[in-house]
Amino acid sequence: MTNKPPSKKWFSKAVLLWLAFALVLGLFIWAALSGRLGSKSETFSYAEDQLPAIKVVVLNGCGISQLAAEFAAHLSRKNIDVISVGNTPHPVYDKSIIVIRKGDKEDLARLQKMTGIQRWTSAVNEYYSADFEIIVGRDFEQFMN
């Protein structure tokens, strides 16, 4: 037997374990706060066929015979519900345009993606029969792919 007191190795091992735990916990908190652990709700989105159809009125804005009806038939293959077709009072539109009547910006983005028409304006009317109005201009061919 020795007169040497027992060593405190267990104490130094416990301190090292606590330091390692604190380091791992600190790294996890840093990753969570810096956005490295993204939430799944941000990346989830519905497919277009799971969303309600967008209601539109299609107007011929350039005077080409039966253009609104042909464009409406083209839109029927997409998630777009054409309420009616017609002509603008003056056939002067060179560029096609979407008019917001009752719709919102999310639906506008969907409609732009489905039709390819990026130009838009707002003429809100809560009594209008559709959410949007599409005025088809002379550039219609590029949107009928």
Image (tube, rainbow, N blue to C red):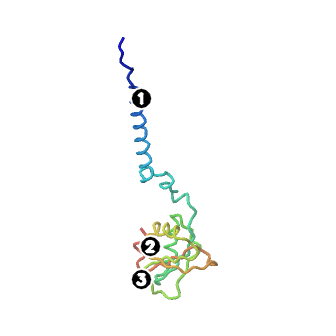
Q: Secondary structure at mark 2?
A: loop
Q: Quadrant of residue 15?
A: top left
Q: Amino acid at mark 1?
A: Phe
Decide which of 79, 26 is in the foreground and name it.
Answer: 26
Residue contact between numbered discs 1 and 2, judged by CB atoms under 8 Å: no
Residue contact between numbered discs 3 and 1, judged by CB atoms under 8 Å: no
Decide which of 44, 76 is in the foreground and name it.
Answer: 44
Q: Residue at x 40, y 78 (%)?
A: 139
Residue 6 coordinates in the image, percent (x, y)? 39, 20
The quadrant of the picture occupied by the N terminus is top left
Q: Secondary structure at mark 3?
A: loop
Q: Specify few, some or many for label 1: CA neighbours under 10 Å numbering under 14, 14-19, or 20 or more.
A: few
Which sits earlier in the primary sequence, circle 2 or circle 3? 3
Left or right position of 93 against 4 = right
Which sits earlier in the primary sequence, circle 3 or circle 1? 1
Residue 134 coordinates in the image, percent (x, y)? 51, 76
Count of numbered tags? 3
Which sits earlier in the primary sequence, circle 1 or circle 2? 1
Q: Which residue is mark 2?
A: 117
The numbered disc on residue 94 is 3
Left or right position of 89 against 144 = right
Judged by depth in the image, the label closer to the viewer, 3 or 1, is 1
The numbered disc on residue 11 is 1
Q: Secondary structure at mark 1?
A: helix
